[in-house]
Image: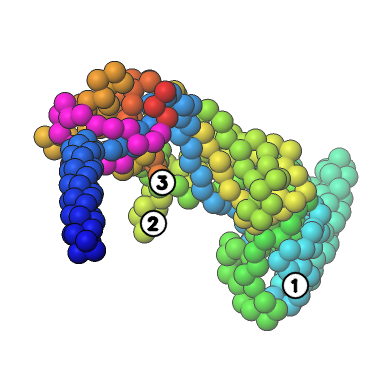
Amino acid sequence: MVNQSQRLQGGRLRRVTLFAAFSVLALSSCEGDNKKTEVDVPQVTVEVAKLDRDVLRAAGTGEIKAQVESELSFKLSGRVIERQVGVGDRVTAGQVLATLDPTEQLADIQSAEAGVSAQDATLRKASSILNRRKTLIQTGALSQQEVDSAQQEFLSAQKDLDAAKARLETAQEALKQTELRADADGTITARNVEVGQVVQASATVFTLAHDGARDAVFNVQENALSTGAEPISLNVSLLSRPDISVPAKIREVSPTLDRSLGTVRVKLSVENAPAEMTLGAAIVANVVLAQQDRISIPWQSIFSKEGNPAVWVVDRDALTTALKPVKIERYDADRVVLTSGIEPGELVIVDGVQFLRENQKVAILKGAAQ
């Protein structure tokens, strides 16, 4: 009896085990079908295309300079015996900046003064002779010819005195030229001489930045000026203090190209520059060149169609794909700005574009698909 009971229990156990095994196989088969279905439908990430204000900006670094600068030089050659100022010093109009050795000029003045004295004596003598002969001719003691001769000598002496005085003025002016003076109030920005150095006439000794209006000076790549369009807005700010910013406007564009750098010098007029924008201060120019509403997409959305840029989009209702050619305005750091090809509201595929085909069914994994 015991053996019979054990056989019955063993049979029931085997039937239960087989049933469980078939159930597991059936479930595994269903899960496999589901996974196969999921694999057949690619999952993609999308982004809703929308118009955003596209601002085309540019920036560059430069420095603050005086709008007016003077290259100061001696009009004479000579040896510098004194230098009163250096770079960074404030000066006033008429202030002596440097002095040449005046020994030669002082000697010229002494010689010219002696010449004036001699010619003055000659003139006084000629005048006395002329007056005496004019008196004697009235008595008939002298002829008219002798009076005319005295008159010619007097006029010649008078001309010689005028010439001597002119030479004295020239020598005195040359002495003044041994002192180099500031032609305006301002700041010395460059110095090219030292005491004891011999300088030539017209060689630049100091550069003087005049007080008043300031310029922001930049070296700009030539192609940046090729459009010729006026910027929408333009301001300059300190490189070390971006919060200190003032409007500016283009004052001058150099007509010549620096061939070594391929740049053109541009000067921006800075009105009412703050005190912090000192001469030589490093600045940044921020320019808004254009602005327009455009669609931009992530760079990974860009695909290719027959060698031209294109973008995969998803039909909202059918959830099928389409590859649309686009025109690109420019590439930014993480976005691509489009000129045309995509309409606002279209679903642009952001991730998963590598293995797609036309009219393919997809599943939207995430993104702004509403």
Mark 3 highlights which residue? 333
Identity, as a three-letter code, of the amino acid under mark 1: Arg
Q: Counting other residues with Cα less than 10 Å from the Cα at mark 1, is it few (<14), some (14-19), or many (20 or more)?
A: some
Q: Quadrant of the C terminus?
A: top left
Mark 1 highlights which residue? 83
Tell which of 14 and 199 is nearer to you: 14
Mark 2 and mark 3: Cα distance apart in space = 26 Å
CB atoms of marks 2 and 1 within 8 Å:
no
User: At which x and y percent is residue 288?
Assistant: 51, 33
Residue 283 in view, yes or no: yes
Question: Where on the picture, by quarter, is residue 100?
Answer: bottom right
Tell which of 253 and 310 is nearer to you: 310
Q: Residue at x 32, y 32 (%)?
A: 364
Q: Residue at x 29, y 18 (%)?
A: 317
Badge 1 or badge 3: first in the primary sequence:
1
> Residue lying furthest bottom in this view?
196
Mark 2 highlights which residue? 261
Badge 2 or badge 1: first in the primary sequence:
1
Identity, as a three-letter code, of the amino acid under mark 2: Leu
